[in-house]
Image (tube, rainbow, N blue to C red):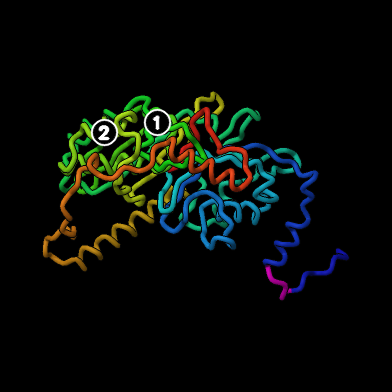
Amino acid sequence: MSSTPPSSPSEPKSKKRRKAARGINWSTAKTGRFLLKFAYIGTRYAGVAWQNQEEFGVNTVENELFKALVKTCLIESRTSCDFSRCGRTDKGVHARGNYATLRLRVKPDGTEFPYVQMINRVLPEDIRILRISSVPNDDFDARFSCKSRTYKYFFPSEGLNLAVMSRAAQRLVGQHDYRNLCRMDVEQTVNFERTIHSFDFRDGGDISHAVITGSAFLWHQVRCMMEVLMLVGRGLEQPEVVDALLDIEKTPGKPSYDLADGAGLVLFDCEYDVDWLDQNAEEDQEAVAMFSRAAVAAQRDLAVLQCLAGSSGGTGEVKARKYVPIMQRAKGPTLDERVAVAELKSARKGKSSTATDSAPSSVTE
């Protein structure tokens, strides 16, 4: 008979789990490098990147992800797992194919745990791990090894000329300086050149979408481009406005215009060119099924809203004010002016200089 006393039936399960977690000697625990593919509905989150929840009072996708990884004892902490994420998405933006590299605990014999099932079991339902692949070397990084990113942007088609929008979008393809088609943050980068490989539109009837593939993207770049293209699609701007915004000599300061709604934006996929990774490998079916169930629920909610809207046939749009063309609007500070302000702030803080890129940063939509 075992001499180990039985655990008290009144002992809470959470206490048992905490005791098990403390039993892991992280100084000797074996770990391996992995590439994690994950998806999320961004509606409830203040972006993907981790933030101090106690200090800022907001929750993010990575906040939940790190909680799940610690809870399952796959990492010791957020700062100890060598985490690197490919795409940074903003508040309310979604992802079907974001990626991260990190170190996860493996079994004593070096074999893997059933990571996808373990992590998804404790994540919120609107965040899912789709696939985890072993990384065979230390050279690969989810952010810096990425060759291209693809976004999809969904929008109501009514009142828009998709053919004209598509022709205007082709002016954005290629390598350009997109400083007038993004939100400039000169403390992070002063290099606003990026390369867009393709920019296509798909007519979906009531809801259409754009598919944009590029090497990397600037902060709010996709949403800025889509706002301008939808103005072109409504006939409020001519396609030539794209050329004017790309001409930084003619337009050194960004004109004032709105930002397209982030609710329609999806980071669809990130592409890697390594022989050990099959990006078409099967994804966890239960994880994919969760999004299918969410889609059915959204269709129900749409039917309810259509019922509430009644049969008046109205579009719900508010009568617009007199339109002022983009190039006639007030211009923001030039890049040099922004850098000068940033350097002044930095000097006041006792710093030497602002950050200056020599290479494109990762996607930051």
Q: Position of residue 74 (x, y in %)?
A: 66, 49
Q: Residue at x 60, y 54 (%)?
A: 68
Residue that badge 2 annotates = 242
Residue 131 makes an appearance in the image: no
**Three-letter code, disc 2:** Val
**Three-letter code, disc 1:** Gly
Distance Cα–Cα, label 2 vs label 1: 17 Å
- Quadrant hosting residue 109: top right
In screen coordinates, is 160 left or right of 301? left
Q: Is residue 169 magenta?
A: no
Q: Position of residue 363 (x, y in %)?
A: 46, 38
- Is 227 or 300 nearer to us in this picture? 227
Q: Residue at x 86, y 63 (%)?
A: 2
The magenta region covers 9-13
- Helix, strand or loop for disc 1: strand
Which numbered disc, 2 or 1, marks the residue closer to the eye? 2
Q: Residue at x 56, y 54 (%)?
A: 51
- Quadrant hosting residue 23: bottom right
Residue that badge 1 annotates = 214
Q: Which of pointers 2 and 1 lies earlier in the amino acid sequence? A: 1
